[in-house]
Image: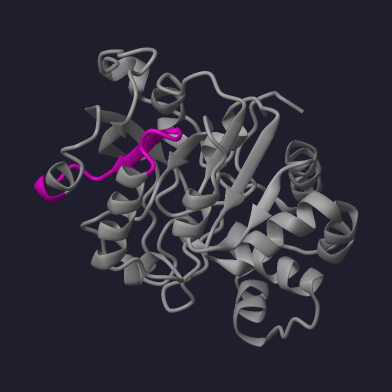
């Protein structure tokens, strides 16, 4: 299962729209690691190699991936007959009490697929589904099965990023996508990433910079530039993207087709294989729906 597929999840801060820019900079490798997997858009966009490791501190996210990998038909059966409604979203979010790992995966998958922008911090997790722009429940089984096929043989863990980096095999490649340095994390993420964690990340990557290759994505700020002044290179990247969805149901708004621009630094400890200039506005506008 080496063809490009979309992430099975919606995920705040995911790299769906930047996939082309990122994969242009990925060198040849035999072992691939994401210490901050999230929606794992880059893993799903590239070919599998002989070794693959996805990690995220969010245990419910990883549990859902494990169930998709190992028990896809059971998850499909558990979600069978579900409809995407505001009432069911509220039920799974507030009332449903999972008793098993399969139950936890069912809840996580349903809430994620029907939440605004895939935000899974329950304090800010609101209904955000629309038939025209979201993946419909009748298509969830196909999504689960193709994801399961791609995940076969993939190592899935929920560890602190430092342990993953320490245990990374020699000559592996790490795609590292931590929360932004200047971000309102409490709004988006179930697990916050403190300033000290950013410093920890820089310190351990510097320690092992000759052991493996990494591509690190960050918001462009002077603090980050100073923190990684030891890296081989920093590439300033930007991309346009369009969001099509029902948007903020909590406040009753309906923002369809809004355009935004992503700005980031790609920080590498190697000579990128392709130092491509920024695409022009026509080629960077990935006019795709949130779910293909």
Report whether residue 281 is seen. yes
Residue 24, percent from left and from top = 43, 19
Q: Position of residue 240 (x, y in %)?
A: 31, 31
Quick check: is 54 in the magenta stretch?
no
The total of numbered circles placed on residues is: 0
Looking at the image, residue 70 sits to the left or right of residue 26; the answer is: right
Q: Position of residue 148 (x, y in %)?
A: 78, 44
| Quarter containing the N terminus | top right
Q: Nearer the viewer, residue 237 or 143?
A: 237
Quarter in which the C terminus is drawn = top right
Asked where in the image residue 78 lies, by quadrant, the reply is bottom right
Please tell me which residue is depicted at 63% across the width and 68% down the height of the picture: 60
82 up-or-down from 51: above or below? below
Over which residues does the magenta segment extend?
A: 208-223
Image quarter of residue 31: top right
Q: Residue at x 35, y 39 (%)?
A: 216
Residue at (65% x, 32% y) in the render: 5
- For the point 30% across and 33% down, the residue is 266
* Image side of residue 26 versus residue 79, left or right: left
User: 208 or 231: which is nearer to us?
Assistant: 208
Q: Is residue 15 visible?
A: no
């Amino acid at each position: 299962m080496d063809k490009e597929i979309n992430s099975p999840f919606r995920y705040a801060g995911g790299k769906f729209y930047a996939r082309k820019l990122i994969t242009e900079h990925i060198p040849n490798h035999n072992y691939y690691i994401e210490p901050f997997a999230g929606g794992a858009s880059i893993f799903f966009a590239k070919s599998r190699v002989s070794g693959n490791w996805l990690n995220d501190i969010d245990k419910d996210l990883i549990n859902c991936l494990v169930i998709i990998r190992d028990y896809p038909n059971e998850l499909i059966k558990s979600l069978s007959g579900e409809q995407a409604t505001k009432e069911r979203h509220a039920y799974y979010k507030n009332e449903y009490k999972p008793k098993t790992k399969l139950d936890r995966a069912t809840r996580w998958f349903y809430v994620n697929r029907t939440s605004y922008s895939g935000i899974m911090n329950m304090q800010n997790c609101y209904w955000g589904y629309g038939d025209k722009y979201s993946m419909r429940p009748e298509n969830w089984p196909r999504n689960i099965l193709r994801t399961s096929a791609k995940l076969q043989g993939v190592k899935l863990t929920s560890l602190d990023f430092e342990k993953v980096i320490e245990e990374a095999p020699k000559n592996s490649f790490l795609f590292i996508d931590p929360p932004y340095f200047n971000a309102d994390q409490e709004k988006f993420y179930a697990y916050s990433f403190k300033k000290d964690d950013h410093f920890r990340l820089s310190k351990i990557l510097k320690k092992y910079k000759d052991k493996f290759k990494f591509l690190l994505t960050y918001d462009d700020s002077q603090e980050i530039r100073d923190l990684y002044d030891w890296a081989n290179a920093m590439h300033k990247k930007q991309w346009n993207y369009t969001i099509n969805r029902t948007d903020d149901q909590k406040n009753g708004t309906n923002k369809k087709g809004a355009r935004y621009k992503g700005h980031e630094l790609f920080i590498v400890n190697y000579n990128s294989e392709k130092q491509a200039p920024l695409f022009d506005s026509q080629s960077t506008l990935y006019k795709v729906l949130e779910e293909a």
